Amino acid sequence: MATTVNGNGHGQSSLDDLGNHIYLEKQDKLRDIGIDIQTSQIVVVGSQSSGKSSLLESLTSFSFPCGQGLCTRYATQITLRRHHVKSIVISITPRLNADSALTDRLRAFRHELEEFEEQDVASVIEKANEVMGIRSGEREHDMSLPMFSDDILKVEISGPERSHLTVIDVPGLFSVTDEGITTELDKTMVETMVQRYMENERTIVLAVMSCLADRATERVLQFAKVADPSGERTVGVLTKADLAKEKAVIHNLLDLVRGKTLNLGYYVVRNRGADESNLTISQCRMREKELFAEPKWAELAKLGRTGVQDLSMELRSLLTKLAKQELPKQRVEVTKRLADCQRIFNGMGPTRADSASQRECLTKLASRFERIIHDALEGRYEGHPVFDYKPDLKLITKIISLNEGFSDLMWKKGHTYNFAGKSQHKGDETTLDYETSTNEVLALGASFPELNDIIDTDNFHCDGPSDADIMELIDECYRNSRGPELGTFGGSLLAMTFRAQAKKWPDIVRSHVKVVIVLIHSAIEGFLETIFVDRRMREELWQTALLDQLLEAYRRALDHAQFLIDIELNGRPNTVNHYFNDNLQKARMNRITERMGMVLHEDVIVPKSALQCLAMSKSNADQVKEDIHDILKSYYKVSRKRFVDVICQQVIEHYLLDGSVSPLKVLTPELVTKMSDDTLEMIAGEEAGTKRERERLRNEIRGLQEALKVLRG
């Protein structure tokens, strides 16, 4: 058998000083509670013929019942306690995944004996095998039954001569199956069970093997290497030292112990021989002392690594250190798991057996959803832990940042051509952050196939303004559409040049709105996962009551964005904003100032004729085209600012975030009150699996609360 040792004893004169019993008793209590938490322990692993049983007997001062099938087909927790009354109590701790009926049946198994009689203990263990439903006794050859079990047999031994010690004995490794007895599946199950104990980071691995074994091919070392690659938790134990007759073998053992190929080193022990079954434990210990007192073992004995006593002293140190350093970590682990379980359990709400309880449950959850959405839009993150571990749900923060990037992009790259003059915005690298963020969100949108009919997720890129001269555009438009006006131009000419200058706006706007839609859609899904922890309920609610309304809300926002685009680009240019006239007058003044600068010089008198020539040097067409440019520039600036504002205010803020038609306002308590009983049953009706999960969580919470009391006590 592979054996897990965890205790406060070393099997010699006193077990009490093997570790600090206060810390180790806490580990026992944690195991008794039956929760899935790693406890501090020492695992002894090796083949069935490696001498582990004899080593275990020496460590515990307890002789285990002999016989095929006893204590070898499941983990057996053996706890020794000092008490003035002698007793042996045998019970079963159910596997973690056992259903409630099986759990109750297994926990009901309990037998108490006053004295240790091998036949009585063997009889009780046989009954335990039957309760677990494994092959044994009359059913030994019933291949329809499993050979091994994940349940744990618990043996508590009390008496005035006992000392605190807990041993978890698990089935040992075997490489060859016995026809009609064990199968490859059994072999795999045992290996998995042993690996589970070895991989526990709170476990010290005792790799047990015969001193005559070939360590290059020893499976126990291979298993230890996988479970503990760094070798920081592995101690080697070389058994059957009495069989090492040749000096060369002893010399090799000395080299191995000295070499410390394992971080925690090797120990050499003597086992009970096959012809020593009648010897007492004390007699076996005496023979071990006599063996290592022989001259050929003297050099090895000086290293303090021979015999169970030396091994026990090392276990004492390791267990004390391990238990003390892991206890604070266990408190943190249990506290976090308890909080997680309570959150999930509370999220499931009360039992939902009828429409009234279903409506009440959904109404409460919808109210919580409504509150967290409100706080997400107000930037009030401190009251919801979800914002700490899911920062992407900080919705208003991300959208404000995107709106600013959208405005910046429109300012720097939204125009097709640069306007004439000194102030130029050719676009710069600061807009790359916005484009990168946009494409990251669009990539996220690809994970929502339900949005495929509404938005595309192609990468977005906006080129900077063209290097072409805008006056060439104005000249072409003027020549192709001039009318009979004298010294002025028709209104259609401004509209034409404006559309050409703002032709990138629709793509920029649609991309921005799509990005916000994806963010909102992802956030809604994230908030639903946080509030509606019952996955079936959440998915039914999504498909039955939310998705169609969400898609309709997104379409409304996109339609309104297109409406604003049509007004701004396809309608007649129009504004009553006084900044338009201010900008226009400044542009004209700048032109006059620039021209005068060509003839005016400091302390130089300029002839009147020169000024007259300056004013009369422009043709009618050139003058009109300059006016078109200045009017277009002034109007474009006013229009861009207005357009950015209405997109952010109406499309983003009203249609997508905070308006009555926002997708974030779809799930409300009012929606639940309007649901029919059939809809409620479809969404919130409790399945058998949900009931089992509720019961499992209730039991786990109870166990974690008990564990926390133990750890804090």
Image: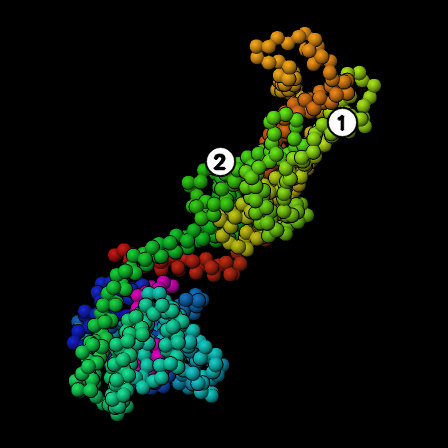
Where is mark 2, residue-wise?
A: 378
Position of residue 675 relative to residue 650, above or below, is below
Q: Position of residue 240 (x, y in %)?
A: 27, 85
Residue at the spot 55% in from the left edge and 35% down from the top edge: 404
First of labels 2, 1 by sequence position: 2
Q: Is residue 49 magenta?
A: yes
Q: Quadrant of residue 76?
A: bottom left
Q: Nearer the viewer, mark 2 or mark 1?
A: 1
Is any atom of residue 651 visible in this view?
A: no
Relative to residue 235, is residue 404 drawn left or right? right
Residue at the spot 55% in from the left edge and 55% down from the top edge: 536
Where is mark 1, residue-wise?
A: 475
Q: Position of residue 377 (x, y in %)?
A: 51, 37
- Identify the image quadrant of the N terminus: bottom left
The crowding category of the residue bearing disc 2, from other C-alpha atoms within 10 Å (few below 14, some 14 to 19, many at least 20), is few
Amino acid under disc 1: Asp
For the stretch drawn in magenta, what is the main secondary structure? loop
Residue at the spot 44% in from the left edge and 67% down from the top edge: 97
Magenta residues? Answer: 33-53
Between 242 and 347, the one nearer to me in the picture: 242
The crowding category of the residue bearing disc 1, from other C-alpha atoms within 10 Å (few below 14, some 14 to 19, many at least 20), is some
Q: Is residue 443 magenta?
A: no
Between 684 and 433, the one nearer to me in the picture: 433
User: What scheme was used to colour the molecule?
Assistant: rainbow
